[in-house]
Image (cartoon, rainbow, N blue to C red):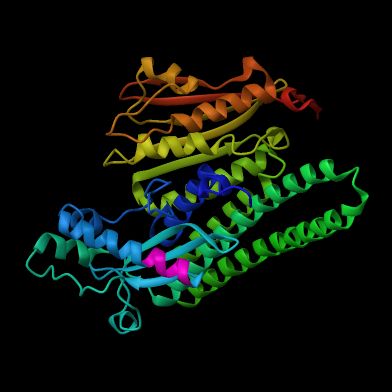
Protein backbone atom coordinates (compact mmCIF):
# COMPACT_ATOMS: atom_id res chain seq x y z
CA UNK A 1 0.00 0.00 0.00
CA UNK A 2 1.24 3.50 -0.77
CA UNK A 3 -0.31 5.03 2.36
CA UNK A 4 -0.20 3.99 6.00
CA UNK A 5 -3.58 2.48 6.84
CA UNK A 6 -5.37 3.06 10.12
CA UNK A 7 -7.84 0.64 11.67
CA UNK A 8 -10.65 3.14 11.00
CA UNK A 9 -9.79 3.02 7.29
CA UNK A 10 -10.42 -0.71 7.25
CA UNK A 11 -13.33 -1.29 9.66
CA UNK A 12 -16.61 0.61 10.00
CA UNK A 13 -16.57 1.52 13.71
CA UNK A 14 -20.39 1.64 13.98
CA UNK A 15 -20.70 -1.90 12.57
CA UNK A 16 -17.86 -3.06 14.83
CA UNK A 17 -19.55 -1.51 17.89
CA UNK A 18 -22.81 -3.34 17.12
CA UNK A 19 -20.96 -6.64 16.67
CA UNK A 20 -18.92 -6.05 19.84
CA UNK A 21 -22.03 -5.23 21.93
CA UNK A 22 -23.88 -8.29 20.60
CA UNK A 23 -20.83 -10.50 21.22
CA UNK A 24 -20.59 -9.29 24.84
CA UNK A 25 -24.31 -9.80 25.44
CA UNK A 26 -24.17 -13.34 24.00
CA UNK A 27 -20.98 -14.53 25.75
CA UNK A 28 -20.87 -12.48 28.97
CA UNK A 29 -17.34 -11.30 28.14
CA UNK A 30 -16.31 -7.64 28.32
CA UNK A 31 -14.88 -6.22 25.09
CA UNK A 32 -13.26 -3.12 23.58
CA UNK A 33 -11.37 -2.45 20.34
CA UNK A 34 -8.12 -0.45 20.38
CA UNK A 35 -5.78 0.95 17.72
CA UNK A 36 -2.10 0.00 17.47
CA UNK A 37 -1.24 2.55 20.18
CA UNK A 38 -3.74 0.99 22.59
CA UNK A 39 -6.26 3.84 22.29
CA UNK A 40 -9.92 2.64 22.36
CA UNK A 41 -11.87 3.24 19.14
CA UNK A 42 -15.11 1.71 20.49
CA UNK A 43 -17.03 2.08 23.73
CA UNK A 44 -16.47 -0.60 26.38
CA UNK A 45 -19.05 -3.41 26.25
CA UNK A 46 -20.08 -5.20 29.47
CA UNK A 47 -17.14 -3.89 31.55
CA UNK A 48 -17.13 -5.81 34.89
CA UNK A 49 -17.76 -4.23 38.29
CA UNK A 50 -14.61 -5.89 39.61
CA UNK A 51 -12.40 -4.25 36.98
CA UNK A 52 -14.05 -0.85 37.44
CA UNK A 53 -13.38 -1.06 41.18
CA UNK A 54 -9.76 -2.26 40.75
CA UNK A 55 -8.97 0.57 38.30
CA UNK A 56 -9.95 3.23 40.84
CA UNK A 57 -6.43 2.79 42.26
CA UNK A 58 -3.80 4.30 39.93
CA UNK A 59 -1.26 1.57 40.67
CA UNK A 60 -3.73 -1.19 39.89
CA UNK A 61 -4.85 0.71 36.80
CA UNK A 62 -1.26 0.82 35.50
CA UNK A 63 -0.98 -2.94 36.01
CA UNK A 64 -4.20 -3.37 34.00
CA UNK A 65 -2.81 -1.25 31.15
CA UNK A 66 0.48 -3.18 31.16
CA UNK A 67 -1.39 -6.48 31.10
CA UNK A 68 -3.59 -5.36 28.17
CA UNK A 69 -0.56 -3.99 26.29
CA UNK A 70 1.30 -7.28 26.76
CA UNK A 71 -1.69 -9.25 25.44
CA UNK A 72 -2.00 -7.00 22.38
CA UNK A 73 1.73 -7.21 21.64
CA UNK A 74 1.75 -10.99 22.02
CA UNK A 75 -1.23 -11.35 19.65
CA UNK A 76 0.49 -9.04 17.13
CA UNK A 77 3.74 -11.03 17.40
CA UNK A 78 2.03 -14.38 16.79
CA UNK A 79 -0.70 -13.11 14.47
CA UNK A 80 -3.20 -15.18 16.46
CA UNK A 81 -5.49 -14.66 19.49
CA UNK A 82 -3.65 -14.48 22.81
CA UNK A 83 -5.30 -15.75 26.01
CA UNK A 84 -3.74 -14.80 29.34
CA UNK A 85 -4.36 -14.01 33.02
CA UNK A 86 -4.46 -10.37 34.09
CA UNK A 87 -2.83 -9.20 37.32
CA UNK A 88 -6.25 -9.34 39.03
CA UNK A 89 -6.65 -13.06 38.39
CA UNK A 90 -9.20 -12.87 35.54
CA UNK A 91 -8.88 -14.40 32.08
CA UNK A 92 -8.49 -11.96 29.18
CA UNK A 93 -7.90 -12.38 25.46
CA UNK A 94 -6.51 -10.21 22.66
CA UNK A 95 -7.43 -10.69 19.00
CA UNK A 96 -5.08 -8.96 16.51
CA UNK A 97 -6.35 -6.94 13.56
CA UNK A 98 -3.73 -7.34 10.82
CA UNK A 99 -3.38 -6.17 7.22
CA UNK A 100 -0.55 -7.65 5.13
CA UNK A 101 1.42 -8.45 8.27
CA UNK A 102 0.94 -4.96 9.72
CA UNK A 103 -0.63 -4.67 13.17
CA UNK A 104 -3.46 -2.07 13.15
CA UNK A 105 -5.02 -2.80 16.52
CA UNK A 106 -6.77 -5.47 18.54
CA UNK A 107 -10.06 -6.53 20.08
CA UNK A 108 -9.56 -7.04 23.83
CA UNK A 109 -12.11 -9.18 25.69
CA UNK A 110 -12.52 -11.28 28.79
CA UNK A 111 -12.80 -10.26 32.47
CA UNK A 112 -14.08 -13.73 33.44
CA UNK A 113 -13.03 -16.56 35.76
CA UNK A 114 -12.36 -20.18 34.85
CA UNK A 115 -11.50 -23.32 36.83
CA UNK A 116 -8.25 -23.09 38.83
CA UNK A 117 -6.74 -26.13 37.08
CA UNK A 118 -7.42 -24.53 33.68
CA UNK A 119 -5.93 -21.24 34.94
CA UNK A 120 -2.59 -22.98 35.47
CA UNK A 121 -2.37 -23.62 31.73
CA UNK A 122 -2.40 -19.91 30.90
CA UNK A 123 0.45 -17.36 31.01
CA UNK A 124 0.36 -14.14 33.03
CA UNK A 125 -0.31 -11.01 31.02
CA UNK A 126 2.80 -9.37 32.48
CA UNK A 127 5.95 -10.47 34.24
CA UNK A 128 4.42 -9.41 37.58
CA UNK A 129 2.76 -11.72 40.08
CA UNK A 130 -0.98 -11.63 40.72
CA UNK A 131 -2.10 -8.71 42.87
CA UNK A 132 -3.23 -9.75 46.37
CA UNK A 133 -6.70 -8.34 47.14
CA UNK A 134 -7.31 -10.51 50.24
CA UNK A 135 -7.17 -7.43 52.49
CA UNK A 136 -9.77 -5.54 50.44
CA UNK A 137 -13.16 -7.18 51.11
CA UNK A 138 -15.13 -5.07 48.60
CA UNK A 139 -12.82 -5.97 45.72
CA UNK A 140 -12.81 -9.61 46.86
CA UNK A 141 -16.64 -9.60 46.93
CA UNK A 142 -16.81 -8.29 43.37
CA UNK A 143 -14.24 -10.86 42.26
CA UNK A 144 -16.40 -13.65 43.70
CA UNK A 145 -19.38 -12.26 41.71
CA UNK A 146 -17.46 -12.23 38.42
CA UNK A 147 -18.86 -14.43 35.62
CA UNK A 148 -17.31 -17.92 35.53
CA UNK A 149 -16.91 -19.89 32.30
CA UNK A 150 -14.59 -22.52 30.82
CA UNK A 151 -11.31 -22.28 28.93
CA UNK A 152 -13.00 -24.04 25.99
CA UNK A 153 -15.64 -21.30 25.76
CA UNK A 154 -13.00 -18.56 26.05
CA UNK A 155 -11.03 -20.12 23.19
CA UNK A 156 -14.20 -20.47 21.10
CA UNK A 157 -14.99 -16.80 21.78
CA UNK A 158 -11.46 -15.81 20.74
CA UNK A 159 -11.81 -17.80 17.50
CA UNK A 160 -15.18 -16.15 16.84
CA UNK A 161 -13.78 -12.63 17.29
CA UNK A 162 -10.77 -13.53 15.14
CA UNK A 163 -13.06 -14.75 12.35
CA UNK A 164 -15.27 -11.65 12.51
CA UNK A 165 -12.28 -9.27 12.54
CA UNK A 166 -10.65 -11.02 9.58
CA UNK A 167 -13.91 -11.03 7.63
CA UNK A 168 -14.41 -7.28 8.14
CA UNK A 169 -10.77 -6.55 7.20
CA UNK A 170 -10.79 -8.74 4.08
CA UNK A 171 -14.13 -7.32 2.95
CA UNK A 172 -12.82 -3.74 3.05
CA UNK A 173 -9.45 -4.70 1.60
CA UNK A 174 -11.24 -6.19 -1.41
CA UNK A 175 -13.01 -2.86 -1.90
CA UNK A 176 -9.70 -0.97 -1.64
CA UNK A 177 -7.95 -3.37 -4.01
CA UNK A 178 -10.79 -3.13 -6.52
CA UNK A 179 -10.62 0.67 -6.43
CA UNK A 180 -6.87 0.58 -6.96
CA UNK A 181 -7.26 -1.85 -9.84
CA UNK A 182 -9.93 0.32 -11.41
CA UNK A 183 -7.71 3.42 -11.26
CA UNK A 184 -4.74 1.46 -12.52
CA UNK A 185 -6.79 0.09 -15.40
CA UNK A 186 -7.74 3.60 -16.48
CA UNK A 187 -4.11 4.69 -16.44
CA UNK A 188 -2.86 1.68 -18.36
CA UNK A 189 -5.58 1.33 -20.99
CA UNK A 190 -3.27 2.84 -23.65
CA UNK A 191 -0.27 0.78 -22.58
CA UNK A 192 -0.89 -2.66 -24.03
CA UNK A 193 2.41 -4.03 -22.79
CA UNK A 194 1.17 -3.76 -19.18
CA UNK A 195 -2.17 -5.52 -19.77
CA UNK A 196 -0.88 -8.80 -18.35
CA UNK A 197 -0.04 -7.06 -15.07
CA UNK A 198 -3.61 -5.77 -14.78
CA UNK A 199 -5.05 -9.22 -15.50
CA UNK A 200 -2.82 -10.77 -12.83
CA UNK A 201 -4.03 -8.20 -10.30
CA UNK A 202 -7.66 -8.93 -11.19
CA UNK A 203 -7.09 -12.64 -10.64
CA UNK A 204 -5.64 -11.89 -7.21
CA UNK A 205 -8.71 -9.79 -6.34
CA UNK A 206 -10.99 -12.64 -7.49
CA UNK A 207 -9.11 -15.02 -5.19
CA UNK A 208 -9.49 -12.68 -2.24
CA UNK A 209 -13.21 -12.32 -3.02
CA UNK A 210 -13.54 -16.11 -2.94
CA UNK A 211 -11.74 -16.24 0.41
CA UNK A 212 -14.05 -13.56 1.82
CA UNK A 213 -17.06 -15.68 0.78
CA UNK A 214 -15.66 -18.67 2.62
CA UNK A 215 -15.02 -16.80 5.89
CA UNK A 216 -18.72 -16.30 6.83
CA UNK A 217 -19.26 -20.06 6.56
CA UNK A 218 -16.48 -20.59 9.09
CA UNK A 219 -17.99 -17.87 11.32
CA UNK A 220 -21.37 -19.61 11.47
CA UNK A 221 -19.71 -23.01 11.92
CA UNK A 222 -17.99 -21.61 15.04
CA UNK A 223 -21.30 -20.26 16.32
CA UNK A 224 -23.03 -23.60 15.74
CA UNK A 225 -20.19 -25.37 17.55
CA UNK A 226 -20.59 -23.09 20.58
CA UNK A 227 -24.35 -23.67 20.46
CA UNK A 228 -23.91 -27.45 20.45
CA UNK A 229 -21.39 -27.19 23.29
CA UNK A 230 -23.94 -25.20 25.32
CA UNK A 231 -26.57 -27.88 24.58
CA UNK A 232 -24.25 -30.67 25.76
CA UNK A 233 -23.50 -28.72 28.96
CA UNK A 234 -27.21 -28.14 29.60
CA UNK A 235 -26.86 -24.35 29.17
CA UNK A 236 -30.19 -23.79 27.41
CA UNK A 237 -30.18 -20.01 27.77
CA UNK A 238 -26.63 -19.79 26.44
CA UNK A 239 -27.64 -21.91 23.46
CA UNK A 240 -30.65 -19.67 22.80
CA UNK A 241 -28.48 -16.53 22.94
CA UNK A 242 -25.86 -18.02 20.61
CA UNK A 243 -28.44 -18.86 17.96
CA UNK A 244 -30.06 -15.42 18.26
CA UNK A 245 -26.61 -13.85 17.95
CA UNK A 246 -25.88 -16.08 14.94
CA UNK A 247 -29.04 -14.85 13.20
CA UNK A 248 -28.09 -11.24 13.96
CA UNK A 249 -24.62 -11.71 12.47
CA UNK A 250 -26.03 -13.40 9.39
CA UNK A 251 -28.40 -10.45 8.94
CA UNK A 252 -25.68 -7.84 9.53
CA UNK A 253 -23.04 -9.44 7.29
CA UNK A 254 -25.32 -10.37 4.39
CA UNK A 255 -27.99 -7.68 4.26
CA UNK A 256 -25.65 -4.69 4.47
CA UNK A 257 -24.55 -5.43 0.87
CA UNK A 258 -27.81 -4.33 -0.75
CA UNK A 259 -29.05 -2.05 2.07
CA UNK A 260 -32.71 -2.92 1.34
CA UNK A 261 -34.73 -5.49 3.31
CA UNK A 262 -38.37 -6.31 3.99
CA UNK A 263 -40.07 -5.13 7.17
CA UNK A 264 -40.46 -8.78 8.15
CA UNK A 265 -36.67 -9.30 8.00
CA UNK A 266 -36.01 -6.09 9.92
CA UNK A 267 -38.50 -7.05 12.65
CA UNK A 268 -36.99 -10.54 12.97
CA UNK A 269 -33.59 -8.90 13.50
CA UNK A 270 -35.08 -6.64 16.20
CA UNK A 271 -36.70 -9.70 17.82
CA UNK A 272 -33.30 -11.44 18.03
CA UNK A 273 -31.68 -8.30 19.46
CA UNK A 274 -34.38 -7.97 22.14
CA UNK A 275 -34.22 -11.66 23.07
CA UNK A 276 -30.49 -11.28 23.80
CA UNK A 277 -31.14 -8.12 25.84
CA UNK A 278 -33.91 -9.97 27.73
CA UNK A 279 -31.41 -12.65 28.74
CA UNK A 280 -29.11 -9.93 30.04
CA UNK A 281 -31.68 -7.72 31.77
CA UNK A 282 -34.15 -10.39 32.91
CA UNK A 283 -37.38 -9.07 34.46
CA UNK A 284 -36.17 -5.49 34.04
CA UNK A 285 -37.10 -5.65 30.36
CA UNK A 286 -40.57 -6.32 28.97
CA UNK A 287 -41.13 -6.01 25.25
CA UNK A 288 -43.53 -6.81 22.42
CA UNK A 289 -43.00 -6.93 18.65
CA UNK A 290 -46.06 -6.87 16.39
CA UNK A 291 -46.23 -6.51 12.61
CA UNK A 292 -49.29 -6.49 10.40
CA UNK A 293 -49.02 -9.35 7.86
CA UNK A 294 -50.02 -6.92 5.12
CA UNK A 295 -46.93 -4.81 5.90
CA UNK A 296 -44.38 -7.65 6.00
CA UNK A 297 -43.31 -7.39 2.35
CA UNK A 298 -42.81 -3.60 2.34
CA UNK A 299 -39.18 -2.67 1.62
CA UNK A 300 -37.18 -0.48 3.97
CA UNK A 301 -33.51 0.48 4.48
CA UNK A 302 -31.36 -2.04 6.34
CA UNK A 303 -31.17 -1.31 10.12
CA UNK A 304 -34.14 1.10 10.14
CA UNK A 305 -35.65 0.03 13.48
CA UNK A 306 -32.79 -1.46 15.52
CA UNK A 307 -30.97 1.84 16.33
CA UNK A 308 -34.13 3.22 17.96
CA UNK A 309 -34.69 0.04 19.96
CA UNK A 310 -31.07 0.13 21.12
CA UNK A 311 -31.53 3.77 22.13
CA UNK A 312 -34.57 2.79 24.21
CA UNK A 313 -32.58 0.04 25.96
CA UNK A 314 -29.75 2.43 26.81
CA UNK A 315 -31.82 5.43 27.95
CA UNK A 316 -35.18 4.00 29.09
CA UNK A 317 -34.39 0.57 30.54
CA UNK A 318 -30.79 0.41 31.81
CA UNK A 319 -30.83 3.59 33.99
CA UNK A 320 -34.04 2.48 35.74
CA UNK A 321 -33.57 -0.03 38.55
CA UNK A 322 -37.07 -1.38 37.88
CA UNK A 323 -36.49 -1.54 34.14
CA UNK A 324 -39.33 -0.77 31.76
CA UNK A 325 -41.37 -1.66 28.70
CA UNK A 326 -40.70 -1.36 24.97
CA UNK A 327 -43.25 -2.01 22.25
CA UNK A 328 -42.51 -2.15 18.53
CA UNK A 329 -45.31 -2.28 15.99
CA UNK A 330 -45.83 -1.96 12.24
CA UNK A 331 -49.24 -1.68 10.64
CA UNK A 332 -50.52 -0.76 7.21
CA UNK A 333 -52.48 2.47 6.75
CA UNK A 334 -53.60 2.96 3.15
CA UNK A 335 -50.33 2.66 1.17
CA UNK A 336 -48.12 3.49 4.14
CA UNK A 337 -46.46 1.31 6.79
CA UNK A 338 -46.53 3.05 10.18
CA UNK A 339 -43.75 1.92 12.52
CA UNK A 340 -43.79 2.86 16.20
CA UNK A 341 -41.18 2.27 18.90
CA UNK A 342 -42.59 3.19 22.31
CA UNK A 343 -40.93 3.07 25.75
CA UNK A 344 -41.97 4.21 29.24
CA UNK A 345 -38.58 5.61 30.22
CA UNK A 346 -37.50 9.01 31.52
CA UNK A 347 -38.30 10.77 28.25
CA UNK A 348 -36.40 13.41 26.27
CA UNK A 349 -36.44 17.15 26.90
CA UNK A 350 -38.10 19.05 24.04
CA UNK A 351 -35.04 21.21 23.41
CA UNK A 352 -32.97 18.07 22.77
CA UNK A 353 -35.26 16.36 20.25
CA UNK A 354 -34.52 18.56 17.24
CA UNK A 355 -30.81 18.63 18.06
CA UNK A 356 -30.77 14.82 18.09
CA UNK A 357 -32.49 14.68 14.70
CA UNK A 358 -30.14 17.33 13.29
CA UNK A 359 -27.04 15.59 14.67
CA UNK A 360 -26.05 18.67 16.70
CA UNK A 361 -26.79 17.23 20.17
CA UNK A 362 -23.75 16.52 22.35
CA UNK A 363 -24.19 14.39 25.46
CA UNK A 364 -22.54 15.43 28.71
CA UNK A 365 -20.20 13.11 30.59
CA UNK A 366 -23.05 11.42 32.46
CA UNK A 367 -24.77 9.81 29.49
CA UNK A 368 -24.02 7.96 26.28
CA UNK A 369 -24.54 9.94 23.09
CA UNK A 370 -26.59 7.84 20.66
CA UNK A 371 -27.76 10.92 18.76
CA UNK A 372 -25.41 10.10 15.87
CA UNK A 373 -27.20 6.81 15.18
CA UNK A 374 -30.62 8.47 15.21
CA UNK A 375 -29.41 11.32 13.02
CA UNK A 376 -28.00 8.82 10.51
CA UNK A 377 -31.24 6.83 10.46
CA UNK A 378 -33.25 10.05 9.95
CA UNK A 379 -31.04 11.12 7.02
CA UNK A 380 -31.29 7.69 5.40
CA UNK A 381 -35.09 7.68 5.60
CA UNK A 382 -35.30 11.14 4.02
CA UNK A 383 -32.83 10.09 1.34
CA UNK A 384 -34.85 7.03 0.34
CA UNK A 385 -38.38 8.42 0.75
CA UNK A 386 -38.09 12.21 0.58
CA UNK A 387 -37.87 15.00 3.16
CA UNK A 388 -41.44 14.42 4.36
CA UNK A 389 -40.61 10.96 5.66
CA UNK A 390 -38.14 11.71 8.45
CA UNK A 391 -38.36 10.39 11.99
CA UNK A 392 -40.99 11.85 14.33
CA UNK A 393 -40.18 11.88 18.04
CA UNK A 394 -42.79 12.57 20.74
CA UNK A 395 -41.67 12.50 24.34
CA UNK A 396 -42.75 13.57 27.82
CA UNK A 397 -40.35 13.69 30.75
CA UNK A 398 -40.86 10.82 33.22
CA UNK A 399 -43.54 9.29 30.94
CA UNK A 400 -41.71 7.94 27.92
CA UNK A 401 -40.90 8.35 24.25
CA UNK A 402 -42.67 7.39 21.02
CA UNK A 403 -40.79 7.14 17.72
CA UNK A 404 -42.88 7.13 14.51
CA UNK A 405 -41.53 6.16 11.09
CA UNK A 406 -43.68 6.25 7.94
CA UNK A 407 -42.62 4.10 5.01
CA UNK A 408 -44.52 4.27 1.70
CA UNK A 409 -45.16 1.03 -0.15
CA UNK A 410 -44.72 2.22 -3.72
CA UNK A 411 -41.24 3.65 -4.16
CA UNK A 412 -37.79 4.33 -2.77
CA UNK A 413 -37.23 7.86 -4.02
CA UNK A 414 -33.52 8.02 -3.27
CA UNK A 415 -32.92 4.78 -5.16
CA UNK A 416 -35.25 5.48 -8.05
CA UNK A 417 -36.66 1.99 -7.45
CA UNK A 418 -40.34 1.17 -7.89
CA UNK A 419 -41.73 -1.82 -6.03
Q: Residue at x 43, y 49 (%)?
A: 277
Magenta span dominant secondary structure = helix
Position of residue 28 measured from the top left corner of the image (x, y, whole percent)? 39, 60
Q: Is residue 297 left or right of residue 167?
A: right
- Looking at the figure, which quarter contains the C terminus? top right
Q: Can the viewer see residue 93 in this picture?
A: no
Q: Residue at x 30, y 83 (%)?
A: 120
Position of residue 4 measured from the top left corner of the image (x, y, whole percent)? 55, 49
Seen in the picture, residue 183 relative to 334 is either above or below; the reply is below
Q: Residue at x 73, y 22 (%)?
A: 335
Q: Is residue 168 left or right of residue 384?
A: left
Q: Residue at x 46, y 39 (%)?
A: 310
Position of residue 382 measured from the top left corner of the image (x, y, whole percent)? 63, 21
Residue occupying the far left of the picture: 135
Q: State the residue in front, 127 or 154.
A: 127
Q: Is residue 72 magenta?
A: yes
Magenta segment range? Answer: 71-77
Seen in the picture, residue 9 relative to 72 is either above or below; the reply is above
Q: Is residue 198 magenta?
A: no
Q: State the residue in front, 216 or 184.
A: 184
Q: Can the viewer see residue 94 in this picture?
A: yes
Amino acid sequence: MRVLLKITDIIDVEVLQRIQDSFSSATGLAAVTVDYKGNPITEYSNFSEFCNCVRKDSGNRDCCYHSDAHGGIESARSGKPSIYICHGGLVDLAVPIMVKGNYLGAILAGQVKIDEEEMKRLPLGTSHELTDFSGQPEIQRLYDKTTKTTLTQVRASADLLYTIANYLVEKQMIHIIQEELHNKNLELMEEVKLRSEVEASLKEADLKALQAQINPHFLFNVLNTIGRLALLEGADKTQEMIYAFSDMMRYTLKKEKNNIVTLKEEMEHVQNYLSIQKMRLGNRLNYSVNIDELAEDILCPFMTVQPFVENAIIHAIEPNAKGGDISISAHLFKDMAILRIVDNGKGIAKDKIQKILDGTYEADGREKNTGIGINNANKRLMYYYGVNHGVEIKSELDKGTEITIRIPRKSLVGRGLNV
